[in-house]
């Protein structure tokens, strides 16, 4: 009879390494997941408020409007900074590549 060699042994990753990888992925995705969950929760809240009474939707729609206003103002502020940096009106400092 031919002698068989034992199968090669593989080093398995420990549970600690696996949990560290999961934690790093969770930290990376936490903000987008929280934003999506908050948006979905707000939409469900608006729908339930509309189904119960039209006047109860004022508060969730107000929150939705404030969030949209915050994003618009932040975007305008960032655009103004980039335009000022491009035109040389920004205070001296490290420049972005490509400007």
Image (cartoon, rainbow, N blue to C red):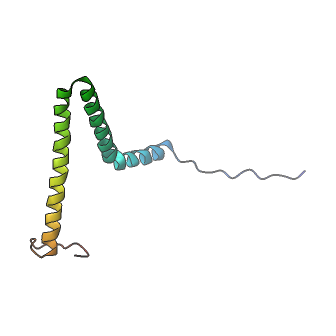
- Please name the residue shown 16% across and 43% down the image: 66
Percent position (x, y) of residue 8?
69, 53
| 31 on left or right of 94 | right
Q: Residue furthest front?
A: 54
Q: How many marks can you see?
A: 0
| 67 on left or right of 9 | left
- Please name the residue shown 28% across and 31% down the image: 47
Q: Nearer the viewer, residue 96 or 55?
A: 55
- Please name the residue shown 20% across and 40% down the image: 64
Q: Write down the quadrant of residue 48 in the picture.
A: top left
Q: Nearer the viewer, residue 63 or 51?
A: 51
Where 67 sits versus 81, above or below? above
Q: Residue furthest top?
A: 52
- Please name the residue shown 25% across and 29% down the image: 50
Where 87 sits versus 21, above or below? below
Q: Residue furthest right?
A: 1
Percent position (x, y) of residue 99?
22, 76
Percent position (x, y) of residue 57?
20, 31
Percent position (x, y) of residue 42?
26, 36
| 7 on left or right of 38 | right
Where 75 sits versus 69, above or below? below
């Amino acid at each position: 009879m031919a002698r068989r060699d034992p199968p090669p042994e593989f080093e398995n990753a420990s549970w600690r390494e696996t949990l560290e990888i999961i934690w790093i992925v969770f930290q990376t995705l936490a903000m987008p997941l929280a934003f999506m969950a908050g948006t979905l929760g707000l939409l469900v809240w608006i729908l339930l408020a509309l189904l119960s009474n039209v006047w109860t939707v004022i508060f969730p729609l107000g929150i939705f409007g404030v969030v949209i206003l915050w994003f618009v103002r932040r975007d305008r502020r960032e655009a103004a900074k980039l335009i000022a940096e491009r035109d040389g009106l920004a205070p001296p400092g490290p420049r972005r590549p490509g400007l």
